[in-house]
Amino acid sequence: MTKLLFIQILCRPLPIHYAKMKIKILKLLLLAPLLFTSGCGIGEWTLSELYVQKIEGTSKVLYKYDAWGGRDSNANGFIILDASATFEVDLRNELPFYRLSAIPSASKIEGVTHDCYNSCGENYYKSQPIFKTMKTDRSVHGGINVITRTFQYRGFSEKERGLQRYAFERFKETRDSLFFYNLDDVESRDGRHLDELKIRKGEIYLQQDASGQITKIIANEVRLNAGDNAIEDSRIVYLTPKNKMMAAELSERGLFREIKITKQ
């Protein structure tokens, strides 16, 4: 196991598939103190994806990144920085969730994550799904309040609708949502057609070419109950324009724009 992987384990929550290894890994860490001679998270990383969203009413921006280090070590997540700062991967400043659940604002940023709660691995089908929030944590990053809601793994996974892919003819934007019209399902064999699809803003990614024309829109949507914040729905939707659509036609509120990465 590499030094980089040890550092990642110390600096961020373990993924679900490492749950059973947690105790063994911690024992190994205690036996290897000499490996940790530098701070967590700053090292040699190669970015594979980078998106940025302006946080309305502030000088801050929210980055979403995916990066690779030595021996196939992966890091990905959200980081808040001042708009004038240069982005770099720093796991110490990564936000403690992996999906946004609302549009980031000057007052707060809300996200979700999950933990086992006795529903991982062989316990998955033995457990009862729980859809309510199991734990709510509050922290401050970049001067902004961050709310992280943790859900039971099975409860969250049972609300996942999987990946959907559509080609759309036109769109309309409101302050909090995007509406797509005349959509054709390009994934399923039945060729499902939708007259309209509404996606709430927050975690929507715009991919574009060098001219600013949108090539794809990726929407990661998590819907929580307005009353008790229980998980109601989660889906990832790929949307491809049938006609020419420029990124400049859309506002900056609740939308991530792609930063092209220079290959070295």
Image: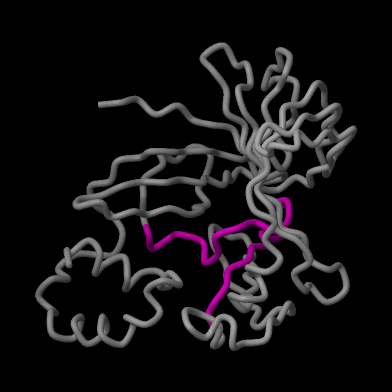
Q: Residue furthest front?
A: 189
At x 23%, y 47%, the residue is 44
Viewer-nearest residue: 146 or 20: 20
Q: Is residue 69 magenta?
A: no
**Residue 99 appears in which quarter of the rendering?**
bottom right
At x 57%, y 11%, the residue is 211
Position of residue 172 relative to residue 219, above or below, is above
Q: In this figure, what is the number of numbered marks?
A: 0
Q: Is residue 147 left or right of residue 95?
A: right
Q: Residue furthest left?
A: 34
Position of residue 44 relative to residue 5, above or below, is above
**Residue 119 appears in which quarter of the rendering?**
bottom right
| Quadrant assignment for the C terminus | top left
Q: Position of residue 174 (x, y in %)?
A: 87, 36
Viewer-nearest residue: 123 or 67: 123
| Quadrant assignment for the N terminus | bottom left
Q: Position of residue 162 (x, y in %)?
A: 64, 53
At x 75%, y 45%, the residue is 201
Q: Which residues are magenta?
A: 91-116
**Residue 59 appears in which quarter of the rendering?**
top right
| Colour logic | one colour
Q: Is residue 113 magenta?
A: yes
At x 77%, y 26%, the residue is 168
Q: Position of residue 200 (x, y in %)?
A: 79, 47
Q: Is residue 154 left or right of residue 258?
A: right
Q: Is residue 250 left or right of residue 196?
A: left
